[in-house]
Amino acid sequence: MAEVRVEAQRGYAGELLRNRKFFIGMIIFLALLAVAVTGSLFVDPAQRRTGSFPARLPPGRGAPLGTDSLGRSVAIQMSEAVPNSLQVGLIAAFLGTLIGALIGFISGYFGGVVDAVLRILIDVFLSVPSLVFLILIASLVRGVGVQTMALVIGVFAWPSPARQVRAQVLSLKERAFVQIARLSGMSSLEIIFRELMPHMLQWLGANFVNAFIAAILAESGLSLLGLGPQREMTLGMMIYWALSYSAILQNLWWWWLTPILALMFLFLSLYMIHLGFDEVSNPRLHSQG
Amino acid sequence: MIAYLRYLSERFVIFVVTIFVSVTVVFFVPRLVPGHPLTAVFSTMAAAGGRLNAPELIEEYNRLFGLDKGLWEQYVSFLRELARGNLGYSIGSFPSHVSDMLRSAIPWTIGLLTLTTLISWVLGSLIGAVAGWRGGKSRFVQALVSVALVLYTIPYYILAIIFVFLFAFYWRIFPLSGAYSVGLRPGLSLDFALNVLRHAALPALSMIVVSLGWWFLSMRSLITSLKGEDYILQAEAKGLSNRRILWAYAFRNALLPQSTGLAISLGRIVGGALITEVIFAYPGLGWLIYNSITSIDFPVIQGGVLLIVFSVALANFVIDMVYPLIDPRIRYEQAGRR
């Protein structure tokens, strides 16, 4: 039985890799990551300080992507910002998917009053834009670092995975194999983890990418409102600094354009990965084109 | 009818609970932060180089919100003041009421976003309908779909930044920021109206283009899915012209779900484009919240947050209330029990 399951999983991964959208998205994503990480390996930490370079240098030999008006290299900022933004996405998406899956499982599996209460709660938090609560919290807890910010974003990222997981559990739990497991005396926890979880993994994959996108969006939104990590670089903070030193009016196009392009490619790649997950998990969507 | 009432009461419960939960979150979160909620705000403000004439203000607030009493009493009095529409005073610009500041910001946001949402909905739906009718084989449609996907994927403020650079800085066609020229007195004159339109054009354009993508994709897939329906085939068999079938048959049937989308995004207007306003220094709610964040003016931030929550919840409730009346196909049980 176990071997069959492993086989099925490998088939799923193979199908994902054969999906064109997933593949292209993954390539762009990994390329961004690789450039940023290898870049950060060659950076001398002292060069991160303001004034390490002459200010307002256009892209050229001294600084491959130019420098800002505080004398920081844009390329060095990027090597810090991309991993930091991805870190926010990763932590927040993991936390949000985990909490969401848990709530969705409990709500769908146990039903009754528990479900009624949790369902209303999911509805409530789905209808209010979470950025609003994030603004409130971030404006109270000033000077947060990248990780704290990721945790706060993650805590509000659960409603959408919760709804999806709940719907999935509802449709799965009446299937024969779950009934048999229950009749053979498995406990609820065992059923959730051994019988339902394997079916949920692909759903959780798509949800995870979704939450990842939402988290990076929330990070850049908060940063642009002036609530980002002031002492660290993220893509949102780079745009924030560029805008607050009016990089556009000073015609320092390399300063604001670099993080914007990185964000665009990041979102495009993540969205393609998400589409790939969707097509492989719901083949019916695929045939509609 | 009874089914409708039951459905309605469930939606109403969700509306009330949404408001209640959000207000409770807004009340308790500041109090989870260590230290006195107001002194914390004041000391950060002082540290940020603000003024330090706080003691009387703190007294005033203590009295106003009953902060010297127990947590439960505070909570009750917070709810009571909210129900009266009292959001307290701004710290940054002290004697002004938060509610007055919100009231002067909100027309700019609603005006700008209603206009852009409607324009982009109409354009996107029309282009999407034609593209859906043409089918996926034409190269042109494929190119449009890719562009729409890119627009739909990127964050909405990215285009705003690029537009500021191109249209306001490089070509200097539109003003850089603000809602009207500095020194102009707001009034009901043609000059002022034209000035306002000129200032609104660029933020509006950036938001129209970004949301076009979504309306285009949604209308296109609606039309594509309707193409195989029996009544379309019958209309074709009757020999009606292609144009007639598209606009009088397919488009009309796709209009209802597409309008739901419009209603939902109209409901989200109030908190919908905070960052666009920041980029253009457009004096709406986003700009107000941004300025309150820079001047650490917590009551105004809190008021803005509550206003957004309330309007979103209200809009959702109204949509839920009206939708089954327009579309008899919706089943109440199903709607509640997704």
Image (cartoon, coloured by chain):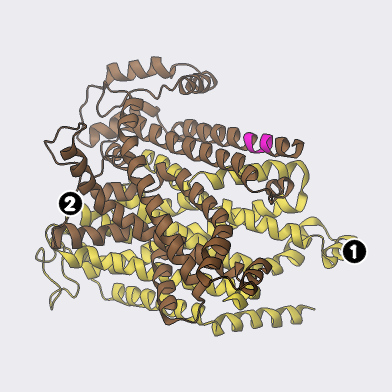
| Residue type marked 1 | Ser
Across and down, in percent, residue A162 comes to: 62, 54
Q: Is residue B10 magenta?
A: yes
B214, above or below B87, in the image: below
Q: Give the range drawn in magenta.
A: B8-12
Which quarter of the rendered picture does the N terminus of chain A lie within? bottom right
For chain A, give the colour. yellow
Q: Which of marks 2 and 1 is in front?
A: 2
Measured as percent of width and height from the top left, residue B1 is found at 74, 37
Question: Could you tell me how far apart the alpha carbons at marks 2 and 1 are, in whole angstroms?
Answer: 70 Å
Farthest residue toward the front?
Answer: B239
Amino acid under disc 2: Leu
Position of residue B121 in the picture relative to residue A274 (left or right): left
Q: In the image, is residue B79 above or below residue A220?
A: above
Res. A30 in view: no
Q: Name the residue tied to disc 1.
A: A184
Query: Color used for chain B?
Result: brown
Read off the residue under disc 2.
B176
Neighbourhood count class around disc 1 (C-alpha, 10 Å): few under 14, some 14–19, many 20 upward? few
Q: Which element carries disc 1, helix, strand or loop?
A: loop
